[in-house]
Amino acid sequence: MAQPLAKKDDDRDDEAEYSPFTGIEKGAVLQEARVFNDPQLDPRRCSQVITKLLYLLNQGETFTKVEATEVFFAVTKLFQSKDIGLRRMVYLIIKELSPSADEVIIVTSSLMKDMNSKSDMYRANAIRVLCRITDGTLLTQIERYLKQAIVDKNPVVASAALVSGIHLLQTNPEIVKRWSNEVQEAVQSRAALVQFHALALLHQIRQNDRLAVSKLVTSLTRGTVRSPLAQCLLIRYTSQVIRESGQNTQTGERPFYDFLESCLRHKAEMVIFEAARAITELSGVTSRELTPAITVLQLFLSSSKPVLRFAAVRTLNKVAMTHPMAVTNCNIDMESLISDQNRSIATLAITTLLKTGNESSVDRLMKQITNFMSDIADEFKIVVVEAIRSLCLKFPLKYRTLMNFLSNILREEGGFEYKKAIVDSIVILIRDIPDAKESGLFHLCEFIEDCEFTYLSSQILHFLGNEGPKTSDPSKYIRYIYNRVILENATVRANAVSTLAKFGAVVDSLKPRIFVLLRRCLFDSDDEVRDRATLYLNTLGGDGSVGETDKDVKDFLFGSLDVPLANLETSLKNYEPSEEPFDIDAVPKEVKSQPLAEKKAPGKKPTGLDAPPIVPTSTIDAYEKLLSSIPEFSGFGQLFKSSAPVELTEPETEYSVNVVKHIYDENVVFQFNCTNTIPEQLLENVTVLMDATEAEEFSEVASKPLRSLPYDSPGQTFVAFEKPVGSPAVGKFSNMLKFIVKEVDTSTGEAEEDGVEDEYQLEDLEVVHADYMLKVGVSNFRNAWESMGPDNERVDEYGLGVRESLAEAVNAVINILGLQPCEGTEVVPSNSRSHSCLLSGVYIGNVKVLVRLSFGIDGPKQVAMKLAVRSEDQAVSDAIHEIIASG
Amino acid sequence: MEICPLIKNILLLDSEGKHVAVKYYSDDWPTNSAKLAFEKSVFTKTSKTNARTEAEITMIDNYIIVYKCTEDLYFYVTGGDDENELILASVLQGFFDAVALLLRDNVSKIAALESLDLIFCCIDEIVDRGIILETEASVIAGKVASNGLESASSLTEQTITQALATAREHLARSLLK
């Protein structure tokens, strides 16, 4: 043992000897910085100290405000030295210290002097530093120099000014925009990088002017741009112009396509690749357009440079998602990449092959992958598993090979995310390929025999409880489930008990044996396990007493929870223990709009073992509290739904008004949220006069004026209407804001005594069918659909006429119906010709509604739709069709 | 897509994954610990691969990272996930070759630490707040060296073109091995 220890010490000694920064310490370096104040400056020494300071900052050390200020002031002294190297370090440290505005003033004159120096290096660097630390006021002083610098004959100076311009455009756009002429001149520069920077700045100056960008692209694509980087920029701008102009499908000609294609023959690989990628990303790209791009990417696949191979295979991978056929030509090259040293490249190659492969190549491919899986990291494996899942759905006949593969890798070592991906995949395959069910369930059973993840065990047990009893021989699963009761932790045990109960409920022949097992669970050490066992024994009638009816039991065990979990959670938190039992029917069912974070990641929906979306309920609670506190409305009963606010005024007008529609069984209450944006006015007695001549079924019953509406503090006024019970009455209201206006003296804030009556026209408001529909999701649409039964099903087909796109048509229908899209089916993959969408909700009168929509689109963008509705009431099914027929 | 190519960071790490010189141009890693965590995951993922001759590439958390290494120095350039990989590679190549020129082919940790001022200036001349300033190694090295310290004089003795030739020759030799 002594030997290696001694060696280690040696190593350490070596390091200490060699590194110039060993034992460096902030306090000491700050002391050293005092040399900056010496009357006789030693440039070499000063440079070293600055390097040390930069080293400290680079290691993550931070200076306090005082320390930074002290260093900064000391550094400003160094402008006295004429040493070039030292000046260079001074520029660097000033940028790192990012001084405050009052500190900037101290170096401004020194830097401005450098900007006018004879040395180009001084000028370029001084421009960069000054633009970095300056604010708008100083900028006007140096603007003249910057404009000159842009067209300076030295490329370093020009680039420095242009790049600074790009940054300044963010903070001082109006100043930088004045430099257009100079920048335009710089675009013609012979220096490659100047051209690149000038083009970048010119485009950013004009980016909001589509026509100007289009002109810029037109003129430059004809001329010659020398710099490869600038050429890449031009390709990006060109694709942007193509995207915005929209293509002319009739003639098949796409503007600028020829330019992109010509770039494929550029001498710089960077440009070739940029162009190839741009072509593959064109919206609605045809295979004829794709071919030349795919050809150059294919060449890149056999390059000796990993970066090129990676770039090519990554792009082809994306193409394979939309145009698998176009990529098949590259399959041979791609297969040789499976053994690529770079595992990222290998993984991308495999997943691309999985997307483009045909049925006959699956077996061969799987063999190659099996060898490959053992030496890649989990994150790559997950990607492969997901690709295999979609392959299996594409070729259901190959399920045996693929399911075997999944079960094999399930048995191997792996982290939670990886195992979860595999389990999710198997679950999806079981759901979608009936033949795969028995073998899939068996693999899952094997897996939970030795599964270290409580979450996965629980999910599988739950799934097994739903699917297992429906198989040909349910009894063979019992052993696996009961083993969990013996061997696992409390959470898994409790889940196993529930799963056992589900088998007992469905399979009569197993019932007596299940009772024996459940009774054993009564002696479990955990409360939850015992409670569940007792509960199930009672509901199933295992304790000798008469059980509840069969249907009730099954509903209880298998029925989905029809209230959003978050709502249930808040209701339970608000519930105070009392004589009155907790009523689950009182939990609001409205699904609130998703939080922003979820919207940003639409691709990351739970796909396998799905959970209902979790949503906040705060606003509806707030509405309910607000309305029930108003005596006029307290008799309206339970609030059914509150709409999102609808704006009734243009933005930035004198008064801003929006309205929320509250729907009750017999009433509708309109809540007008008003804001007064004029400081010189106080509004009093504010009401909204609603004219219901175009809404015949409604009659006004009450109105609650707003007593006073001072400047910039929002207030509400309400109007209530009566409508036929439970009926989805629709109509249009025209609205007038009426009030008494009083002048306010802004200096004292006091209003005058006398006011003038005035009114203000608001936009019309409509009550539509969607207002009577609650967005309520279901966690498993298929189960819900089947349990609803075909009794009240109504099916019909509709032509929707010419639509912009399939996605647009789907969204329009969802909005008209006001239903909640389920299982992510509201997302339409680009380029698809048909789409199915699943919707669910609750109609006024608490009637559950499920809707299946099938869309198809043909060449001239004619959209046809099949609408199938199931609900608890035939009349409601008809009403849904009525909405579409009239809309 | 980001319309203008942007560099997220440039890293120069030693053979233990520790900082020699790093520069971040993006707010994606707001704290020092976020930066260190990123560097750690980058280094663990890349340190075992051989990126001596050709630049290698990988993806971590939706960032593209191109890298190159010598005995005890690791060069990284990071970009967003829709960045043109070859543009990032050209920045890396410029960085790597410029450092080789400045250190006169002795691309080692010790040499880098001893000329850390040149390394800092070098990074400063390649990227300005995320925007590529220059990718041509000889130009970068020229800009740094012409106002560098005492090494400037010695580097001018051995002119830039000569140095570049040496570097090329060196590269050719290593390819032939």
Image (cartoon, helix red, strand yellow):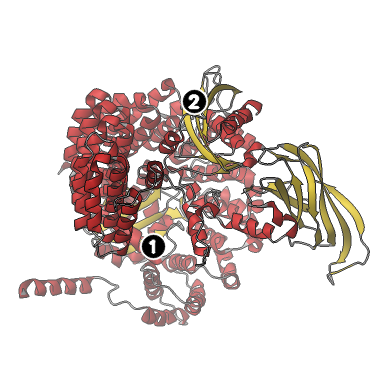
**Left or right relative to A570: residue B151:** left
Residues A831 and A145: in front is A831
Q: CA distance from mark 1 to mark 2?
A: 43 Å
| Crowding at mark 1 (Cα within 10 Å: few <14, some 14-19, many 20+) | few
Image location of residue B46, percent across then percent down: 26, 52
Image location of residue B1, percent across then percent down: 48, 42
**Figure quadrant of the N terminus of chain A:** bottom left
**Left or right relative to A577: residue A416:** left
Chain letter for mark 1? B
The nearer-to-camera label among 1 and 2 is: 1
Q: What label sits on residue A257 in the rendered view?
A: 2
Residues A372 and A849: in front is A849
Q: What label sits on residue B34 in the rendered view?
A: 1
Residues A266 and A529: in front is A529
Give me the residue at 88% from left, 58% from top. Answer: A741
Label 1: element kind: helix
Residue A447: tell me if it is visible.
Answer: no
Label 2: element kind: helix
User: Is there a contact, CB below 8 Å, between mark 1 and mark 2?
Assistant: no
Image location of residue A140, percent across then percent down: 66, 59
Q: Amino acid at mark 1?
A: Ala
Chain letter for mark 2? A
Q: What label sits on residue A649 in the rendered view?
A: none
